[in-house]
Amino acid sequence: MVSLRAGGVYTKAQLQKELETLATCGMFEKVDLEAKTNPDGTIGLTVSFTESTWEEADHFRCINVGLMQQSKAVDVEDNMTEKEKVDYMRSQERDYRRRMDRARPCMLPRSVHSEIVQILGQGNVSARMLQNIRDRVQKWYHDEGYACAQVVNFGNLNTNEVVCEVVEGDITRVVIQFQDKLGNVCEGNTQIGVVRRELPKQLQKGNVFNIEAGKQALRNINSLSLFSNIEVNPRPDEKNEGGIIVEIKLKELEQKSAEVSTEWSIVPGRGGRPTLASIQPGGTVSFEHRNIKGLNRSLLGSVTTSNFLNPQDDLAFKLEYVHPYLDGVSNSRNRTLRTSVFNSRKLSPVFTGGPGVDEVPPIWVDRAGVKTNITENFTRQSKFTYGIVMEEIITRDESSHISSNGQRVLPSGGISADGPPTTLSGTGIDRMVFAQANITRDNTKFVNGAIVGERNVFQLDQGLGIGSKFPIFNRHQLTMTRFIQLKEVEEGAGKPPPPVLVLHGHYGGCVGDLPSYDAFTLGGPYSVRGYNMGEIGAARNILELAAEIRIPVRSTHVYAFVEHGNDLGSSKDVKGNPTEVYRRMGQGSSYGVGAKLGLVRAEYAIDHNSGTGALFFRFGERF
């Protein structure tokens, strides 16, 4: 309790104040401060005291006196008669009893109460005992994240119940400030309601400040992607004793941004030396206008081509408008409207050769259309999305000509275009309108960097009978993944992650009209590893099963996996049976090992159909 430190420089007034503080704290009967000059000119101080003691107590009570005027001990005047002294002490007891009745119960759990009662059972209550009780109470608060809590007084001494007065750190105000690049307070573009809805309930006025709630607010606000710097700081409220003001300081990002990225493809040249595939540059031009009207609405656009000099060959674009808080900023319902216009080109894995088949001429699928959906977030990770898609699909060969059928290489080296039909209409061009829904239930979390928990995803595409050949279909998928923690570990920074067993299942099915480009494909880094995209088959119904065990090694992990994919005998029901035409098996398994190297997965997988293995490098996660 003595704040003086060896080597410090103090004035006479400071020493006098220290003596008064010790004498009036109620812990000591008598306090003396003796000064002695040393030969080197310094002063040696000796603090002697007689510790105060009170009657034994066998009960303990903790109260929250935050936002109440703190009680101050008042000495009995010497000129009072005995009767006046008794009456005065009784009035003090009544006042303190009323104070205890007005105070709120503290959050201290019964287990800590029991520990303190055991401390009280050691004998008469002393200043040292009260110090131990104070340390134990404050330790619990600070361990639980209540960093502003502190014990301010002990009352009801000389009775059978000791009362511990705690200021827990009640939040009286939440202040949101916007700052410019130099840190000066300025007027922000973002509406305050957008920020306030991201604050957890525990950080609202009337609750006790908890540092974990502050961290959660930091993460929530950061997820808006509107600010370059975010600070959440508590400070004492000078107008309300024991109160806490939470200050949130924000620096906004620029509203408008544009970016151009270029790329050149490199392929092996003579002697295996790397050389440019083409001198013509490709790349992407993108722009973004974020936080429109301060409501986190945004307009995003991008244009991608492999040839900036002649972009009409494979121009792909996307223009998207995002409108969050569809029901209003003040409404707790969290729905976001997204509308996009798009044009994309992707290589179809349906028209892929099986093992030992010469290279199959590729079929490209161009999609252009409009998509509108509404996403309702139930939690940070669980959501429900529903909407409608209107699109035109064109299938093309590698020369960008419209192709109504898949192609195959003849023994003579020629190419035959009598393969499976590529579209529902049989012309190479389809137009359709369908409804789409997706529900995700995700309760995964990170334990020292390892993901554990479970994730379920159900997706549904429903044809509405609008478009080429009036397509009516129901295409559905169910994905279930379990991340099972195999060993309990202590959580915290720098602690090792636990080993994890991953179990994964994916079922896909379709009823009704199904164009070839929408058939389910088996094989690839996100289907059955060790195979190329679509190498196992294309089907109306599929089942994928996978298991993976992850073992932590230093700052990363190694893993072993086994996977299986099966078309459930439905490959023949796809128009033209591309699985049979391109000599694919319709089912396949693989197994292997891998290591996580930063963002890259290095894997050695063995294809069970051919019995050969290969090394793969993949970005991102499998599950």
Image (cartoon, helix red, strand yellow):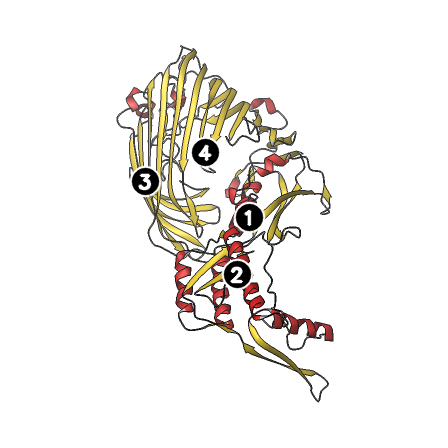
Instruction: Report the residue that reaches farthest toward the bottom.
Output: 39
Amino acid residing under circle 1: Gly
Give the residue number, with chain letter if any, for mark 2: 93
Q: Are marks 4 and 3 in contact (CB under 8 Å)?
A: no
Q: Left or right: 129 with respect to 8? A: left
Q: Which of the image's four quarters has the C terminus?
A: top left
Amino acid residing under circle 2: Glu
Cα distance in 3D space between marks 1 and 4:
21 Å
State which quadrant residue 576 falls in.
top left
On screen, 587 above or below 414? below
Give the residue number, with chain letter if any, for mark 1: 214
State which quadrant residue 422 falls in.
top left
SS category of the residue bearing label 2: helix
**Circle 1 residues within 10 Å: few <14, some 14–19, many ≥20:** many
- Residue 323 can be seen, yes or no: yes
Instruction: Give the residue displayed 49% in from the left and 66% down from the top.
Output: 157
Q: Earlier in the sequence, mark 1 or mark 4?
A: 1
Amino acid residing under circle 4: Phe
Q: Which of the numbered marks, if any, corresponds to residue 378?
A: 4
SS category of the residue bearing label 4: loop
Q: Are marks 1 and 4 in contact (CB under 8 Å)?
A: no
User: Mark 1 or mark 2, which is nearer to you?
Assistant: 2
Q: Earlier in the sequence, mark 2 or mark 3?
A: 2
Cα distance in 3D space between marks 2 and 3:
71 Å
Give the residue number, with chain letter if any, for mark 3: 546
Cα distance in 3D space between marks 1 and 2:
40 Å
Q: Position of residue 158 (x, y in %)?
A: 48, 68
SS category of the residue bearing label 1: helix
